């Protein structure tokens, strides 16, 4: 598909088309982890899913989705691991921005994100914080993660979590950002990152 031909209306139509598919795959992942149906039902589901996957592969990209730019100049990253509209692995995060620059996101992390029993995998905590801090540090232009330091104060229970971040300082290409991941009882992970605009675009 040539996204240069896609205008705002078409983009909305495509989002409405793909979101339910992605949500269904997300549900499938959860069901696959938690199902206790009989063996023959598992085998039947496997066969049906293999057929569905083959159907989707009838036409497709030869590599990852990357970033596409629509005719209206909107950048979309539908394969992104944190926010991708077409990526069932993405929680997905929705990030809001306050007038004072604070970025924040509340998301539910279910069984697919488990690390220690009942707790969010440490790498998933890092994914969420990297993205929220990265967006915060990119508010005045795109920056990549140079360094990300996390302090895991206690386990983060699976369920609804809240991430937030603020830019502490900007020094040319470098932005220092701090943030936290929390559950209903308070902060579970503290994060600090240095986000850098590459000298050469990569
Ligand atoms: C408005 C636009 C919106 C866009 C939205 C996008 C949102 C995105 C949200 C995404 C969120 C998810 C985000 C992701 O998933 S990003 C994916 C994970 N990150 C990467 O893949 C980054 C890979 N690394 C690089 O691309 C480059 O090495 C970077 C960009 C890091 C440096 O680049 P460059 O090679 O050009 O740098 P330089 O050598 O000229 O050095 C410059 C200065 O920086 C200092 N330094 C260098 N490296 C590091 C380091 N690792 N830690 C600490 N400091 C470091 C260096 O000492 C120097 O300091 P000074 O001597 O000046 O004091």
Image (cartoon, grey):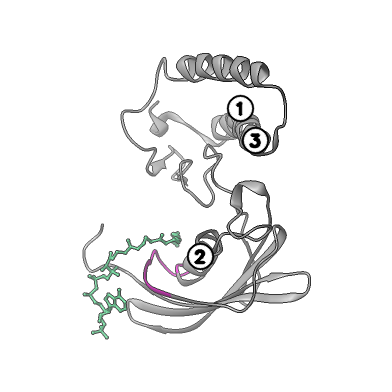
Magenta region: 138-148
Query: On the image, which quarter does residue 174 sit in?
Result: bottom left
State the residue lying farthest toward the front: 39
Q: What is the x, y in percent for residue 44?
A: 62, 14
Q: Nearer the viewer, residue 120 or 168?
A: 120
Q: Quadrant of residue 89?
A: top right
Nearest the camera: 172 or 34? 34
Residue 202 x, y percent position in the rendering: 26, 57
The structure residue drawn at horizontal position 48% and vertical position 65%, both measured from the top left corner, is: 130
> Alpha carbon of mark 1 to alpha carbon of mark 3: how far?
11 Å
Which of 95/120 is in front? Answer: 120
Q: Give the mark nearer the N terminus: 1 vs 3.
A: 1
The answer to whether the residue labelled 2 contacts the one labelled 3, judged by CB atoms less than 8 Å apart, is: no
Residue, disc 1: 17
Q: Earlier in the sequence, mark 2 or mark 3?
A: 3
Label 1, ligand 1: CB separation under 8 Å: no
Camera-nearest residue between 41 and 6: 41
């Amino acid at each position: 598909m040539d996204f240069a031909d896609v205008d705002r209306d078409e983009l909305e139509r495509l989002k409405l088309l793909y979101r339910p598919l992605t949500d269904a795959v997300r549900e499938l992942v959860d069901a696959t982890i938690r199902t206790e149906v009989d063996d023959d039902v598992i085998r039947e589901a496997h066969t049906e899913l293999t057929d569905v996957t083959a159907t989707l592969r009838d036409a497709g990209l030869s590599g990852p989705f990357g970033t596409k730019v629509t005719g209206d100049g909107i950048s979309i990253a539908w394969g992104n691991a944190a926010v991708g509209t077409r990526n069932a692995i993405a929680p997905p995060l929705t990030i809001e921005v306050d007038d004072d620059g604070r970025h924040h996101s509340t998301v539910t992390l279910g069984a697919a994100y488990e690390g220690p029993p009942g707790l969010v995998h440490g790498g998933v905590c890092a994914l969420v914080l990297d993205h929220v801090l990265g967006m915060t540090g990119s508010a005045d232009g795109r920056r990549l993660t140079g360094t990300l330091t996390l302090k895991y104060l206690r386990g983060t229970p699976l369920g609804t979590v809240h991430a937030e971040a603020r830019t502490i300082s900007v020094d040319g290409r470098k932005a220092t950002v701090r943030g936290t991941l929390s559950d209903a009882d308070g902060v579970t992970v503290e994060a600090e990152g240095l986000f850098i605009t590459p000298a050469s675009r990569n």
